[in-house]
Image (spheres, rainbow, N blue to C red):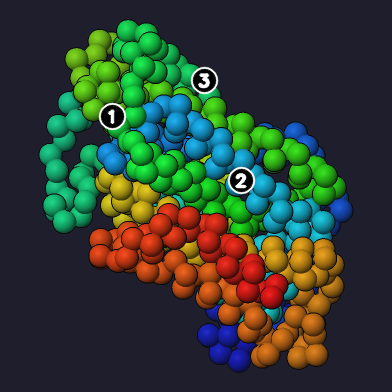
Amino acid sequence: MAKLYPSRFARIQDKLATHSEPGLTNAQLLLVNHDLQPVEPERRQWGFWNFVGFWIADCFNINTWMIASSMISGTGTAGLSWWQAWICVWIGYTVAGTFICMTGRIGATYHIPFPVVARASFGIWGSLWPVFNRAAMACIWYGVQSWIGGECVTLMIRAIWPQYGTLPNSMPASSGTDTMNFKAYLVPTAGIAYFIWTIVKAHGIGPIVKQPGNATGSDLGWGMVLGIMSSIANFATLIVNDPDFSRFARRPSDAFLSQFITIPVGFAITSFIGIIVSSSSTVLYGAPIWNPLQLLGNLLEGANSAERFGVFVIAAAFALAQLGTNIAANSVSAGTDMTALLPRYVNIRRGGYVCAIVGLVMCPWNLLSTSNKFTTYLSAYSVFLSSIAGVIIADYYLVRRGYLRLRDLYSAQATGPYYYTLGFHWRGYAAYLGGILVNIVGFVGAIGVPVPKGASYVYNLNFFVGFIVSSGLYWG
């Protein structure tokens, strides 16, 4: 017998609802669906090498190159030499790997995603704001990574049809982009080949590695600090939501050394290629080019058919790398987090669709217009996510000593241990806001408003400051 509905709206509502267990209350429907439940034993398939493969695939993308090359492309505090930038990369990603292992262990132990982990420290309903923060950042990153992939497509087309580079522009100047690149947005071997090619074009690696940095004294010191923080900022989102991936681990140990070793090694190797390629642009063109795709486009100028084919192959491989990174690190992450915001109607797939739409409308090309804008953005969202990470890690390791009551994380009963006050944990929010407020003045300075130098120095250490203050306030 066909199901009867009291109204057309009720029929549409039922059609849009995701699959759920029968007999759940309205409150339970707001807390659980298939994507939020603990991973069943038969789906816990990730072993040591699965995590190694995941991070190797994730490390090889243009964004990683840009972060490393931006350390040597600027002036003052940004103008590091190649080896100084590489030291920053090693330190930054080692620290990031440590944080990843700390949050990842929660997921690997209890097999629950980040939105559920956050309920223990922020409250059953209070966890929705940190989840929204993470989902919003995933959408922004999705747009940035997609735009970079679109630039790869542009290079592929230009390599085949050079006249595509002179395509008439129909986009307004205020849009920050042009018709050629906007169309492309819609529509490890290559990296090594690119690495070798630029070295050959620069007549050997000697002229590249002999270039000194232009930062000295305190500028050099703070330049290296900023380089380290940029590397950590690249992982700020993944530090928070690593349980989304580690929950599929067979054992907690499978998610430890595999991530702790692979992250700094994999990202350091990718960054080294980006650093050398960017350094070679100084030899070739007289100034460092922080965007490897812009440098690849310059190589098309006056290129013969063989060189154009080389650009096509490299750009195609980069586009594939961007696609893989975007799906794993952004689309799936955003989809998982959005399921917690409206679990009755949103699953991972629908959340991925929303992520793609938001990623387009936020105009990602504006963030990539200069290396300064890019690094400012990286620092800005570190402020918010470092405070979330500080609260979650302090709650799990220092307060609860690794113990969670799994069933209560899915309960909206006022007597539950994670319901706190009306579903919100005031201590978690006080610590979170404390970690943000200590960085606010420096953030204002980063966007161009004059502030005391001390505030700028604090902001230069934004992730550490936010994490230490938030975790200290929560524990205290």
Distance of label 1 from label 2 (alpha carbons): 28 Å
| Picture coordinates of residue 9, whole percent (x, y) | 53, 85
Left or right: residue 262 compared with residue 291: right
Disc 1 residue type? Pro
Location of the N terminus (image quadrant):
bottom right
The residue pinned by badge 2 equals: 95
| Residue located 72% across and 86% down the image | 420
Nearer the camera: disc 3 or disc 1: 1
Res. 53 image quadrant: top right
Q: Look at mark 3 in the image and give the residue it sits on.
A: 189
Residue at image position (64%, 44%) is: 97
Badge 2: how crowded within 10 Å, few (<14), some, or many (20+)?
some
- Name the image quarter holding residue 292: top left
Work out whether mark 1 precedes mark 2 in sequence or the reverse, and give the earlier one. Answer: 2
Which residue is tagged 1? 288
Residue for point 17% across, 26% down: 163
Quarter holding the C terminus?
bottom right
Callout 2 amino acid: Val
Q: Residues within 10 Å of mark 3 (few under 14, many from 20)?
A: few
Point out residue 418 in the picture as x, y percentages from the top left corner: 75, 80
Element type at marker 1? loop
Residue depicted at x 21% and y 23%? 286
